[in-house]
Image: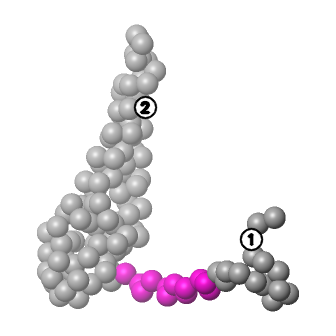
Amino acid sequence: MASRVCPKCNAHVPAGAVAAFSDNVECPNCHTRLEVNPAGRMLASWAGLAAGYLAWRISRGGSGPLGASLPLLYSVLAFGFVSALVTMLAGDLLIAPELPAVEAAPAASHGHDSQGHDGGHH
């Protein structure tokens, strides 16, 4: 499938990895950090929402102890299944932007402070 190809080395990326880690996929060949195109993510989200709404509309109005909760369960499952499927099928991969560098926090000093007081609790 052409949509799951690394743009750097043209290697195929597994569909499961694309669906599970759409914002941080690693190419199995060149180990480049990739992400799914934002338009593909938006399409998958809207398709999942539509499927969830359809599942809720079809299953609502049931009776019994689970009549009110089953439509919600079906809509959540439909959303998850359809959005992952659309991401796998239409998820065009891009090279992810570099992550910002994380600065180390200064080490906490123990003992006396600048005024000569102990750093312990009072």
Segment tinted magenta in the rendering = 96-107
Q: Look at the image and tell me whether residue 21 can be seen.
A: yes
Nearer to the camera, 121 or 58: 121
What percent of the width, then of the height, locates residue 26?
26, 76
Mark 1 vs 2, N-terminal side: 2
Mark 1 falls on what kind of element? loop
**Residue 2 appears anywhere in the view:** no
- Quick one: 94 or 23, which is closer to the camera? 23
Residue at (61% x, 84% y) in the render = 107
Horizontal side, residue 122 vs residue 5: left or right: right
In magenta segment, residue 93: no
User: Residue 120 shows which numbered tag?
Assistant: 1
Residue 8 tag number: none
Q: Which residue is mark 2?
A: 72
Q: Where is residue 32 shown, x and y percent of the image?
A: 27, 84
Q: Quadrant of residue 25?
A: bottom left
Q: Residue furthest right?
A: 115
CA gap, disc 1 and disc 2: 53 Å
In which quadrant will I find the C terminus? bottom right
Q: Quadrant of the N terminus?
A: bottom left
Q: Mark 2 belongs to which amino acid?
A: Leu
- Disc 1 marks a residue whose amino acid type is Gly
